[in-house]
Amino acid sequence: MNRLADAVSPYLLQHADNPVDWWEWGEEAFAEARRRDVPVLLSVGYAACHWCHVMAHESFEDAGVAEVVNAGFVAVKVDREERPDVDAVYMAATLAVSGQGGWPMTCLLTPDGQPFHCGTYYPREQLLRLLTAAGAAWRDRRDEVLTASAGLTEALRAVSDAGPPSPLDAEVLDGAVATLAREFDAAHGGFGGAPKFPPSMVLELLLRHHARTGSEGTDALAMVEATCEAMVRGGIYDQIAGGFARYAVDAAWVVPHFEKMLYDNAQLLRVLVHLVRAVPDGRVAGLAERAARETADFLLRDLATDEGGFASALDADTEGEEGLTYVWTPGELTDVLGPDDGARAASLLGVTAQGTFEGGASTLRLLADPEDPVWWAGVRERLLAARAERPQPERDDKVVTAWNGLAIAALAEAGTLLGEPGYVDAARTCAELVLDVHVVDGRLRRLSRDGTVGAAAAVSADHGDLAEGLLALHQVTGEARWLTAADDLLDTALELFAAPGGGFFDVAADAEALVTRPRETTDNAEPSGTSALAGALATYAALTASTRHRTAAEAALATAGSVVRQAPRFAGWSLATAVALLAGPLEVAIVGPDAGPGRVRRDELGAVARASASPGLVLAVGEPDAEGIPLLVDRALVGGEPAAYVCRHFVCDRPVTTPGELVRLLGS
């Protein structure tokens, strides 16, 4: 076993028995490189990464490669999900050098951490040639290497500048939606071509745009409905167990890359329940609700940890083979279901003799709604039981703060909108775990595993996504403690992560110094730190009437202006937050007793408010003057009855006491 045997990260533990003499990222590794006067080989990946496993088997488990690495380099292994700051710095370098990025990422660094060569996956022989050439250059042409690395580092520092701020006003938002409409794949849903990723944040933007404008000029709602239907019917969605894969390798969502990530499923769950809320009688509402329930159940069944959090991912591979757990042949369906049900299921699920995947196997797609839902439920149950007997993908069971924040928000809202209190309970338990375990000496950490917190400090996205989840949980439960905890997180972010002129750095001012201080403004698979914090700040401002937090949110969004204009698909959460700021704040305060007949009426009023799709709406529910909830201060019962107060920009209408009156008030 090498030094990685004591790591928290499952990805690092996968390499603990490599013959390569790995170090974890840290000053000790770079001090060793300086002592030996050798370069650093930096390898970055993550546990569910298929090509990371391939490179590990080909090279890092090979004694010949290990001999070359150990003799001429200090080898450092990084889990990008544990250290997104390190990943961001060197991915920017990789993109600058090669024009493309991905994982595994392979970089050669000076002992001071400056990159002089960057790439991704290298086959064994190519890696050996690279290491041999790099070692010779380090020995014989050191000045050239150092000059090149210094120039690349300076270029990275320039790239990290967000540029001049540009406010996201109504005109900019409308223009972004129009651009998205032009990029929309009308045949298959989604945006762009293969590979095709679930556009979670863009779908949330479009739902909010529809709620604010009625989709004037573009049919934003139709794009959401078509995309959700195509994904839920496609192979990217697990038709047996629920949950979505990372992406589809084709434009029609037929064949997925099979890893299932917490951040994807949390965000898509939230989109699905928001779609049902927006159009409860819409064309795809039933399909969306079913997928939302199945996805929430997938989170609770397959990703929940014993401690109450949620694991990061299920691997793409099973025993080194992609899709082994998930794909079927007609014969396999017949073996499980019998000839009649097997043939019927094959027709329904697009399983053919030719196959849609490798080796004549097929992914499962729900090509049409089953005529007999009872029959289909039984088929799913039998197939799931049979699939459970197959080899299963590994689970990356580290609990990442940011992604658990996304799950808290999704489960809290799904629980209240779908009438499933168990989802809310799971969100509450997860929030308690993260706050109890991941906050150490008043500061947030990035992750834990088996209840043991890791050493890595939280980044800005951890603060923003966790605050987002806590604020959603506060609005669902009426519990003040979640609002207070979010306040603490946002105060830390404003103090230690804020960038001059608006926005946020990825790492705190007192964090470990890297060759550049990363600052991401694009939304990729998850919200950037800047947009995550902007969204949480906007919600907190509406719940507390804090102009300081709203101003910070607006300034943060302005730093994403250039991304919005160039590629709005990569600014989805910034744009969704901007719509909420433009439409709100719409503050709804509902007061009533915690028990008795009055609680029933209070809950009825709360259900009306939660059914509103207004993107700027925030909700506080509780007893009059409930401690720690600003929106309930000076909100009295009306004639002894529960009442709803609706305020726009903190100017309030007359309170109402019946659900019908509240519906009319929110619709006005």
Image: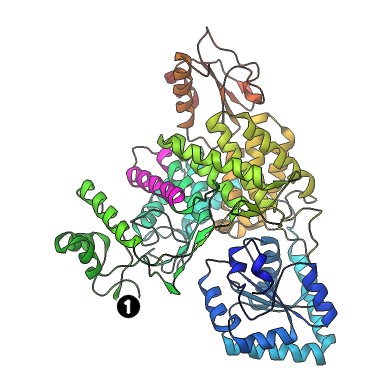
Does residue 284 appear left or right of residue 72 in this picture? left
Total numbered labels placed on residues in the image: 1
Residue visible at 79% across and 70% down in the picture: 28
Instruction: Name the quadrant containing residue 164.
Output: bottom right
Residue furthest front in the image? 1
Colour scheme = rainbow
Residue visible at 50% across and 72% down in the picture: 50
**SS for dot 1:** helix
Residue furthest top in the image? 639
Within 10 angstroms of label 1, few (less than 14), some, or many (20 or more) residues?
A: few
Q: What residue type is labelled 1?
A: Gly
Q: Is residue 319 magenta?
A: no
Residue 203 image offset from top left, x and y in percent: 48, 50
The stretch of residues the image draws in magenta is: 275-301
Residue 630 image offset from top left, x and y in percent: 66, 25
Residue 288 image offset from top left, x and y in percent: 37, 46
Instruction: Name the quadrant containing residue 140.
Output: bottom right
Q: Does the magenta stretch include residue 282?
A: yes
Q: Name the residue under label 1.
A: 359
Instruction: Say if 192 sits above or below 611 in the image.
Output: below
- Nearest to the observer: residue 192 or residue 16: 16
Q: Is residue 112 visible?
A: no
- Nearest to the observer: residue 492 or residue 619: 492
Instruction: Name the quadrant containing residue 553.
Output: top right
- Nearest to the observer: residue 296 or residue 193: 296
Does residue 62 appear left or right of residue 418 in this picture? right
Residue 613 image offset from top left, x and y in percent: 48, 36
Q: Is residue 621 visible?
A: yes
